[in-house]
Image (cartoon, rainbow, N blue to C red):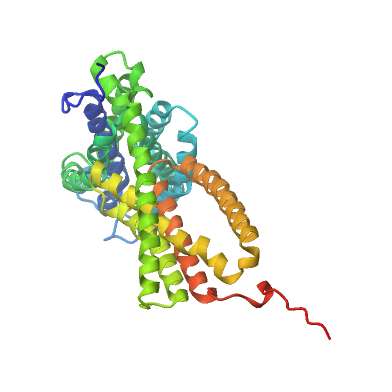
C-alpha cells in the first residue's frame, strides 16, 4: 500500500529551506542596516558647532575632517534625507508584489539587493556633490529595498511546506528587527575608528557579496535545485490528494450539520414563544454573518498553528449556514405568492456575488500573495457586518401588501 502522506521526518536545520530562510534573514538585516545607518552617521556628517562650516586649525581635527567630512545641512534637509528612503519603499511595494508573481523572484530579489548595496557605496560620494543627490540616492535605494521586501514573500508559496510556513517566515522576517540593533551598535564604533564613510562602504560591500551569493544558492523552484535531496523536494512540493480532499470537504460537512441544527433551534424558539418570528429571523442572520466575520478575524490573529488555521477556516465557512433558516424561509413569510421567484432571484444574486468575489480575490492575491489575505478576510468581515445592519433595519416577517392576493367582490 502506498504511503498516504508526505514524509514528516525531514531534516530541518540542515535543510535547504531553512538555509534559505537564514539567507533571507541576513538579507533583511542588511536592508535595515543600510536604511538605518544614516540615523547615526548624520551626527558626525553634519557640523553642528560651526554654522559656517569653517574648518578648525587643529591638526588633529583637520585629519578627523578628512576621515569624517562635515556638511552644512539644515534640520529640514536632514529630515528629508531620513524620510526619503521610505518614499521609494512605500511607493513601489505594491507594483513589486504584482511583478513578483510574473517575473523570476530570484532575479528580482538578487538584482534589487545588489542595486541597494551599490547605491550605499556611492552615498559618501553623493554627499560631496550635494544633499539633493543624497536624497535621490535614498529614494532609489528605497525602491530597491521595497522590491526586496515585497518579492521575498512570494518565495514561501513554493518553498515552505504548510506545516512550516510560520517558522520559515518568522526566521526570515525577524531580520528586519535585528538589523537596527546591529546597526546602532556597530555604526558608532566604525564612525569613531574608521570614519562615517566606511559605514556605507562596509554595508554596501556586504550587500553586493550577499546578492552574488543569492544568485548562486537560490532557485525559483525547489525541484530545480541541483544540490537538494530528493526527500526534501518531495516534502516541500507534495500535497496528498486524499488529505486535500478531506480538508476541503470538512467545511461542507459542518455546514450541513449546522444547517440542520439551525432549523431545529429556530422551530424550538418559535414553539416555546421565546422570540417572535421576526426576532428569530434576525437572530439567525446575525449568527450566520457575524460568526464567519469573527472567525475570519480570528484566523488572521489567533491561528498560530496549522490545525488552528483549519479549525477557524471550517468554522468561518460552516457557520454561514445559519443564515439559511432566514434566507429561504423568510421569503415564504413576506411573499408566499412569489416565493419561487424570490428564491430564484436570491440564487442569481448569490451566483453573481460568487463570480465577483472570485475575480476580486484573484486580483488582490496577484498583488501580494501573502499579506493580501488580510485584506480579503477583512473585506469578508466588513461585507457581512454591513449585511447584518441592512437586514436588522429593513427585515419583515409578515406578508407584505404588494404580495397579498387581491379579493374581487361582485356588486
Q: Position of residue 387 (x, y in %)?
A: 49, 65
Above or below, 159 against 233 in this view is: below
Residue 234, visible in the rendered structure: yes
Q: Nearer the viewer, residue 200 or 183?
A: 183
Q: Nearer the viewer, residue 346 or 140?
A: 346
Q: Residue at x 78, y 82 (%)?
A: 409
Q: Residue at x 20, y 50 (%)?
A: 58
Q: Nearer the viewer, residue 92 or 364?
A: 364
Q: Residue at x 55, y 70 (%)?
A: 333
Q: Quadrant of residue 381?
A: bottom left
Image quadrant where one finds the N terminus: top left
Q: Residue at x 69, y 73 (%)?
A: 405
Q: Quadrant of residue 165?
A: top left
Image quadrant where one finds the C terminus: bottom right
User: Among all residues in the image, which is located at the extreme top?
Assistant: 226
Above or below, 48 against 172 in this view is: below
Residue 228, visible in the rendered structure: no
Above or below, 367 against 3 in this view is: below
Amino acid at each position: 500500500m502506498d504511503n498516504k502522506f508526505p514524509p514528516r521526518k525531514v531534516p530541518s536545520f540542515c535543510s535547504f529551506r531553512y538555509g534559505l530562510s537564514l539567507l533571507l534573514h541576513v538579507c533583511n538585516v542588511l536592508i535595515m542596516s543600510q536604511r538605518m545607518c544614516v540615523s547615526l552617521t548624520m551626527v558626525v556628517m553634519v557640523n553642528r558647532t560651526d554654522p559656517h562650516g569653517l574648518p578648525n586649525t587643529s591638526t588633529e581635527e583637520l585629519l578627523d575632517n578628512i576621515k569624517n567630512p562635515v556638511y552644512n545641512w539644515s534640520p529640514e534637509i536632514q529630515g528629508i534625507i531620513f524620510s526619503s528612503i521610505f518614499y521609494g519603499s512605500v511607493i513601489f511595494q505594491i507594483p513589486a508584489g504584482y511583478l513578483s508573481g510574473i517575473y523570476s523572484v530570484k532575479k528580482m530579489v538578487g538584482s534589487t539587493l545588489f542595486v541597494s548595496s551599490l547605491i550605499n557605496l556611492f552615498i559618501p560620494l553623493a554627499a560631496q556633490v550635494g544633499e539633493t543627490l543624497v536624497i535621490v540616492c535614498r529614494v532609489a535605494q528605497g525602491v530597491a529595498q521595497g522590491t526586496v521586501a515585497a518579492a521575498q514573500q512570494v518565495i514561501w508559496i513554493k518553498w515552505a511546506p504548510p506545516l512550516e510556513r510560520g517558522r520559515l517566515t518568522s526566521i526570515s522576517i525577524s531580520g528586519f528587527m535585528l538589523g537596527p540593533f546591529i546597526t546602532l551598535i556597530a555604526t558608532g564604533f566604525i564612525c569613531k575608528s574608521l570614519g562615517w564613510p566606511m559605514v556605507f562602504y562596509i554595508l554596501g560591500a556586504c550587500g553586493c557579496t550577499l546578492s552574488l551569493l543569492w544568485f548562486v544558492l537560490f532557485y525559483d523552484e525547489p525541484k530545480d535545485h541541483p544540490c537538494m535531496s530528493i526527500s526534501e523536494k518531495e516534502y516541500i512540493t507534495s500535497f496528498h490528494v486524499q488529505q486535500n480532499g478531506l480538508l476541503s470537504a470538512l467545511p461542507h460537512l459542518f455546514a450541513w450539520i449546522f444547517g440542520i441544527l439551525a432549523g431545529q433551534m429556530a422551530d424550538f424558539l418559535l414553539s416555546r414563544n421565546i422570540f417572535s418570528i421576526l426576532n428569530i429571523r434576525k437572530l439567525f442572520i446575525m449568527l450566520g454573518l457575524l460568526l464567519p466575520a469573527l472567525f475570519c478575524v480570528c484566523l488572521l490573529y489567533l491561528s498560530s498553528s496549522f490545525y488552528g488555521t483549519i479549525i477557524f477556516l471550517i468554522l468561518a465557512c460552516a457557520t454561514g449556514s445559519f443564515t439559511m433558516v432566514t434566507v429561504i424561509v423568510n421569503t415564504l413569510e413576506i411573499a408566499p405568492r412569489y416565493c419561487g421567484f424570490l428564491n430564484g432571484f436570491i440564487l442569481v444574486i448569490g451566483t453573481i456575488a460568487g463570480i465577483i468575489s472570485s475575480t476580486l480575490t484573484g486580483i488582490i492575491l496577484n498583488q501580494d500573495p501573502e499579506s493580501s489575505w488580510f485584506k480579503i478576510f477583512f473585506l469578508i468581515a466588513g461585507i457581512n457586518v454591513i449585511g447584518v445592519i441592512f437586514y436588522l433595519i429593513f427585515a419583515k416577517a409578515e406578508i407584505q401588501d404588494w404580495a397579498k392576493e387581491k379579493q374581487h367582490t361582485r356588486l
